Amino acid sequence: MTSINSLAVFCGSRVGINPAYAEAGRILGTGLAHAGIRLVFGGGRIGIMGIVADAVLAAGGDVLGVIPEFLTRWEVAHDRVTELVVTDSMHTRKRRLYEESDAFLVMPGGLGTFDEAFEIITWRQLRLHDKPIFLCDVAGSVAPLVATIDHAIAQGFAAPSSRDLFEVIDGVPAVLERLKLVPAGTGGPASRL
Ligand code: AMP
């Protein structure tokens, strides 16, 4: 049994071309439910997002979806989550996702996923929170993102210590093992988010 209560998962609103991405989403969702960790996510029922949420629910777990009003149609809001919060803007949505979570996990995705990943990493750099951030590699999905950060470090635009703001983990089973070691109360208060 893990000691964290809630994990925010950032992932694609599409499934991608490699079936390994959807499979990773299914394993993640089932694992979170079995570990008693609530899924906090963007509230859609499409793409990897929907696959993770469906897998948590199928295994009897809890899901909080946070979706801005304008995306409820586009992103096809998930209608079976434990709780769905509809916000007035993307900014309110992101803050609520961050506040509700004890840690963050980046799974394969597109521009929205990158935005959320970089934002939560930079907010940690700014000491607005100290919650753990995990990047899960699935079939090489993380390498381009980390290469972008390494390039910024090599070019003198980021401190080498930027690499300590997040952890790269190879595959979902290793993520689930790592989550068991995250102590309760990690990250402190969310008042600066
Ligand atoms: P994507 O990775 O582009 O499929 O998007 C995944 C999630 O990020 C979805 O929940 C989107 O609502 C959200 N998202 C998409 N575009 C943006 C954006 N420009 N800024 C922040 N979040 C976004």
Image: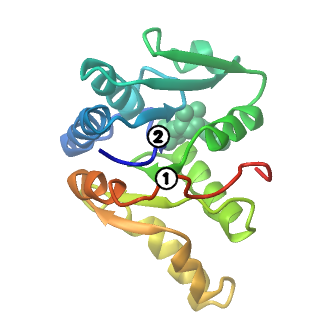
Tag 2 secondary structure: loop
Q: What residue appears at the point 66 percent right and 82 percent down from the top-left corner? A: 158
Q: What residue appears at the point 22 percent right and 39 percent down from the top-left corner? A: 27
Disc 2 residue crowd, few under 14, some 14–19, many 20+, Cα 10 Å: some
* Residue 87 - label: none
* The image quarter in which residue 59 lies: top left
* Quarter of the image with the N terminus in it: top left
In the image, residue 53 above or below residue 25: above
Place of residue 77 in the rendered image (x, y in percent of width and height, measured from the top left): 52, 15
* The image quarter in which residue 39 lies: top left
The mark lying in front, picked from 2 and 1, is 1
Place of residue 61 in the rendered image (x, y in percent of width and height, measured from the top left): 34, 25
Place of residue 140 in the rendered image (x, y in percent of width and height, measured from the top left): 28, 62
Q: Disc 2, disc 1: CB below 8 Å?
A: yes
What amino acid type should be assigned to the residue bearing mark 2? Asn
Q: Quadrant of ligand 1?
A: top right
Residue under label 1: 184
Task: Give the distance between the C-alpha atoms of the residues marked 2 and 1, in whole angstroms.
Answer: 8 Å
* Residue 5 - label: 2
Q: What residue appears at the point 67 percent right and 39 percent down from the top-left corner? A: 94
Q: Nearer the viewer, residue 84 or 14?
A: 84
What amino acid type should be assigned to the residue bearing mark 1? Ala
